[in-house]
Image: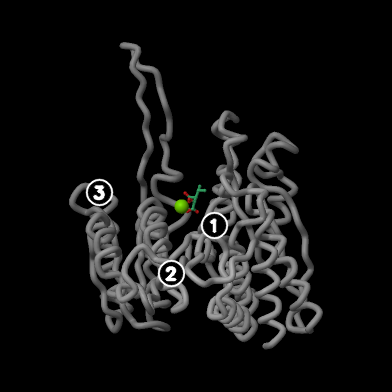
Amino acid sequence: MATHKLLLLPGDGIGTEVMAQVKRVLAFLEQQGLASFAIEEDLVGGAAYDQCGLPISEEAMKRAFAADAILLGAVGGPKWANVPYEARPEAGLLRLRKDLQLFANLRPALCYPALADASSLKRELVEGLDILIVRELTGGVYFGEPKTITDLADGQKRGVDTQVYESYEIERIARVAFELARTRRNRVVSAEKHNVMKTGVLWKQVVSEVHGADYADVSLEHQLADSCAMQLVRAPKQFDVLVTDNLFGDILSDVAAMLTGSLGMLPSASLGAVEELTGKRRALYEPVHGAAPDIAGKGLANPIAMIGSLAMALRYSFGQGDVADRIEKAIAGVLAKGYRTNDIKSEGATVVGTEGMGDAVLAELAIG
Ligand code: IPM
Ligand code: MG
């Protein structure tokens, strides 16, 4: 069996707590002979800053380049509110995304039947929901230059962020969305603001061209991003694959996440291009939720999104979809049996902490 080189970057806040549960799952898979890992661990975010004054060290970046896949917990927290902008915890995550060229961010929003009542929307609107958000992750306003605050002569200041997209960036993310749609319900919605933004005009044009040239069999609809946000809460089940830029994707994926009951449930994959020679692609897997400083250190965090991120790694990086299925089945089983962390608790549920949820998932995995 191939040994997968895995880099663990637990990061800050609840990142370390949820990663601890993933380590238990990794040990289980190894013991059972289901998978084989060579595991390294390093710091990212505030934890790295405290140690070396940078949100990720050069050494950790080297390890990231050498890994088959990276699992990241979360970064950030009030402790680092006043560190220099360039060294803030989030900069470590953004550097990983940018330097590894992880342009395709897959954020599935799945509503488990057992959790339909945890959503803030009515059960009938979200039950059976299965959306895949494909977010462009290495371009747009996150990285565009200039990005500055300057002093003006009259004592005022001017802040500038720049939204930039080149056609190749739009084309490659559109292709990812269309390819994935073909493996699902064959529908893509593309969201932008072509009524206000030049990048939106280009986005719409390039997505349409790629569609016409190579994916005419997939249904494509363009929505304005604001209207798309409204549709996501009005009738979320109309969506199959939703492709959008970096900033809109950040916002719309939080909305989609909440439809499913809790941000604590959703994993994500950030993928690079497939290398022609090796057939491999760089990849980082992380929960959609953040470091949650308000509950950090209390053993309350929901580890399901982090464990689900490991399942995505097995599926997309290691070609072990069967083991990924088994983990996802275990998660569904635990929920069906009524185990709930605080964020998804409901009447009559067995409320457990982070460790307790880890126990329940392991017990379910052992059943097979
Ligand atoms: C996300 C997060 C990040 C982002 C932050 C932590 C920089 O919100 O992954 O959605 O804005 O991309
Ligand atoms: Mg976000």
Under mark 3, the amino acid is Lys
Residue 57's disc number:
none
Distance from Cα at disc 3 to Cα at disc 2: 29 Å
Q: Please tell me which residue is depicted at 59% across the width and 71% down the height of the picture.
A: 350
Is residue 282 among the parts visible in the rendering?
A: no
Measure the alpha-carbon separation of dots 2 and 1: 24 Å
> Which marked residue is nearer to the observer: mark 3 or mark 2?
2
Quadrant for the N terminus in the image: bottom right
Query: In which image quadrant can residue 185 be found?
Result: bottom left
Question: Which is nearer the N-term, disc 3 or disc 2?
Answer: 2
Q: What residue is at 25 percent from the left and 59 percent from the top?
A: 230
Q: Position of residue 193 (x, y in %)?
A: 24, 53
* Numbered label tally: 3
Secondary structure state at the residue bearing disc 3? helix
How far from the left and from the top, in percent, is residue 329? 58, 82
Which comes before the other along the chain, label 3 or label 1?
1
Name the image quarter holding residue 362: bottom right
Q: Look at label 1 and name its amino acid.
A: Gln
Q: Which residue is mark 1?
A: 101
Label 1 SS? loop
**Which is more toward the observer, 216 or 81?**
81
Mark 3 crowdedness (10 Å alpha carbons): few <14, some 14-19, many ≥20 = some
Residue for badge 3? 198
Looking at the image, residue 313 lies above or below residue 59:
below
Q: Earlier in the sequence, mark 2 or mark 1?
A: 1
Against 336, residue 161 (above or below) is above
Disc 3 and disc 2 in contact, CB within 8 angstroms? no
Side of 245 where 77 appears, left or right: right
Which quarter of the rendered picture does the C terminus lie within? bottom right
Which residue is the site of mark 2? 109
222 to the left or right of 359 = left
Residue found at the far top of this picture: 154
